[in-house]
Image (cartoon, helix red, strand yellow):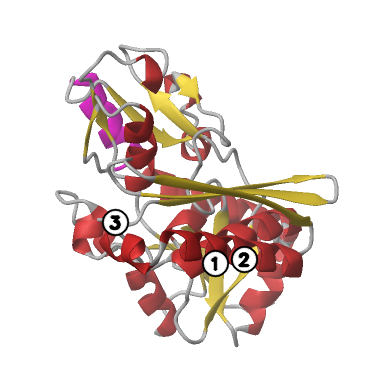
Amino acid sequence: MNDTPLRIGTRGSPLALAQAYETRDKLMAAFPELSGEGQIEIVVIKTTGDAVLDRALQDIGGKGLFTKEIDEAMLARDIDIAVHSMKDVPTYLPDGIHLPCMLEREDVRDVFISNKAKSVWDLPQGAVVGSASLRRQSQILARRPDLKVVTFRGNVQTRMKKLDAGEVDGTLLAAAGLRRLGMEEVITDLMDAEDFIPAVGQGAIGITCMEDDERANRVLAALNHDETVVRVTAERAFLAVLDGSCRTPIAAYSRLEGETLHFHGLVAKPDGSEVHHITRTSAADLAAAETMGRDAGQELKDKIGPDFLATAG
């Protein structure tokens, strides 16, 4: 093993750091030689998505806001691997960087958090829901157009403070993040993933490195979880076909049942006035998953037409 420390690049939020430490612990368990003092170094990198908190993500560029600066650090060889939430990773990576590893996926579901109602559907008429996600907004408004959804950003702790201060009547977050932070106790309602479709890759941690970095590729191969890769690949293939605008709510969820991969995709208008679903099944291997996701995306794209993707925002 190399004598120089293995440098893990990450965002600095509590959740991002929890994911980086989880990755570090798995590396140390798989490679005892990495357990020594200073063998693994965690490098915190501030991203545009972390720096600009007063505007919705789609208003400051959308894709890549949580990965761009980390990618730049990797291309400059300032870090060796980078730990990301898969739902933040664009479908196309910079030349030279690849994604050889995903850790075993956590709970994919969204959760509702409120002091005022048992579920988002039980909120009183005209209640205010805080969410930075157009995907969540569109699915809420499709069923409850009377609710008001306002932009709600910041890390989990910041959002909980805003909720407790009464700025909103409820908010939605990913179950996986709360579990990784040991904050399950704040969950009011776990939402069914086939009823309220999660973000592409939600609950999965992806780890990137340079394609030509032999050490990074070797250690990451030991951490890769094949089932997670199959599921997330189907979802990302669906997104890649439809990814015409960061202002278009797109959601996808896949699950394995025996040797069959079940897929559910969604495209909507942000105001929930139009929602399109598609379901598919395929064999549970990587090639079949990618083909299925791509075909499902193309079928929806043909159905809704190019104007939908261009003008959904």
Quarter of the image for residue 297 reads bottom right
Is residue 164 within the magenta segment? Answer: yes
Give the number of callouts: 3
Q: Judge from the rendering whether residue 38 lies leftward or rightward of residue 157; answer left or right.
A: right
Q: Residues within 10 Å of mark 3 (few under 14, many from 20)?
A: some
Q: Quadrant of residue 72?
A: bottom left
Look at label 2 and name its amino acid: Asp
* Label 1 neighbour load within 10 Å: few <14, some 14-19, many 20+: some
Residue depicted at 51% across the width and 28% down the height: 191
Can you name the residue that lies furthest to the right here? 259
Q: Residue at left 58%, top 57%?
A: 235
Q: Which residue is label 2 attached to?
A: 295
> Which contiguous range is marked in magenta?
155-165
Q: Nearer the viewer, residue 99 or 157?
A: 99
Using the image as rendered, state which of residue 220 and residue 142 is in the foreground: 142
The CA span between labels 3 and 2 is 21 Å
C-alpha separation, residue under disc 2 versus residue under disc 1: 5 Å
- Nearer the N terminus, badge 1 or badge 3? 1
The residue sitting at 57% across, 51% down in the picture is 204
Per the rendering, the mark at residue 312 is: 3
Q: CA distance from mark 1 to mark 3?
A: 17 Å
User: Which residue type does callout 3 highlight?
Assistant: Ala
Residue indicated by mark 1: 298
From the viewer's perspective, is residue 15 above or below residue 188?
below
Crowding at mark 2 (Cα within 10 Å: few <14, some 14-19, many 20+)? some
Is residue 100 inside the magenta stretch? no
Q: Is residue 34 rendered to the left or right of residue 204?
A: right
